Amino acid sequence: MTDMAAFIEGMPKAELHLHIEGTLEPELKFKLAERNGVDLPYDTVEEVVAAYDFDSLTTFLVGYYEGMGVLQEEQDFYDLAMAYFRKVHSQNLIYAEIFFDPQGHTSRGVEFSTVIEGLHRARNDAAAQLGIDAHLIMCFLRDMSAESAAETLAQAEPYKDWIIGIGLDSDERGNPPVKFKDVYARAAEQGYRLTMHCDVDQENTVDHIWQALDVIGVERVDHGVNSLEDPLLVEELKSRGIGLTVCPVSNVYVVQDSRAADIKRMLDLGILATVNSDDPAYFLAYMTENLKTAQAEGDLTQDEVVQLVRNAFTISWAPEDRKRAYIDRLEAYAANAGS
């Protein structure tokens, strides 16, 4: 183990791009399937992992949605989230903003309340038992209708205080940000923070990032790597203080390149780039592994690795005093590691 690897392992970390359904490890999938009487097309953990042979966003999403079928009861969502929290606690993660996909569950007969109550209970226990400050971001599935997204926003109203923001994910093909202009406007009126996926190397991705900024009014962009193709867009991201939540190991699976060199370039340009794990059970890498990949493949210095994590705290939706406390903790760690 190199000194840099040890430094990354010990860092206090923040994560802003994490799909809780994407943390469903094979062992838990089998446990929940047995508990809920669900037949799986696999007999062993090894067979599940072997099925993670993704080469695009579309092929990944097929396996992702298939895995959701074992999540049926409130306790299932609690167990899913707590497994994630325990894992990242071991990697010194102290802050997380977590996506969840209610339409992926309500569309198969699971009540919205079942999903949110399990996740919220886990969030509270993660704070009390592990010291992790976690918040929930409700994502709309962009390959479903805008009307379905509006119905989901209405379903969330009784639980509004449990949800910090709104996101947009799933298949981007033919589903531009502008499709969800009206429902995002309603979400903003209700006080939700706004983010949105603009996936890597998708058709019209640069135009979609502009739409996310100018039509939707997002506060950050999830992925957003293709912004580097447009110098004017780079300047716009910087002037507005818009951060990007990049997921290097996910990129390896989806576009066969971690894009770590692009992360390095973002830092050089002054973009608020961050590193995140996306769907770590499917991509076999949590926060520590993603930071190590970005560092090694991007040839990042220790200061640049610290900057990535500092950026995450900076663009998080934590209160300003808490952000400052987290950044102070990170900088004290870095100073002690360098002494």
Image (cartoon, rainbow, N blue to C red):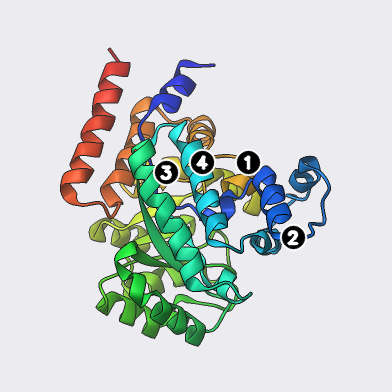
- Between the residue at mark 2 and the residue at mark 3, the CA separation in whole angstroms equals 49 Å
- Between the residue at mark 1 and the residue at mark 2, the CA separation in whole angstroms equals 26 Å
Q: Which residue type carries mark 3? A: Arg
Reading the chain from its start, which is encountered first: label 4 or label 2? 2
Total of numbered circles in the picture?
4
Foreground of the two, 82 or 178: 82
Foreground of the two, 233 or 32: 32
- Rendered residue at 39%/46% (across/down): 125
Q: Which residue type carries mark 4? A: Ala
- Between the residue at mark 3 and the residue at mark 1, the CA separation in whole angstroms equals 25 Å
Residue 284: numbered disc: 1
Looking at this rendering, what residue extends furthest in the left direction? 321
Residue 260: numbered disc: 4
Q: Which residue type carries mark 1? A: Leu
- Rendered residue at 41%/22% (across/down): 7
Q: Which residue type carries mark 2? A: Gly
Q: Which residue is mark 3?
A: 265
Residue 37: numbered disc: 2
Tell me: residue 114, above or below residue 147.
Answer: above
Q: Position of residue 15 (x, y in %)?
A: 41, 46
**Label 1: how many Cα within 10 Å (few below 14, some 14–19, many 20+):** some
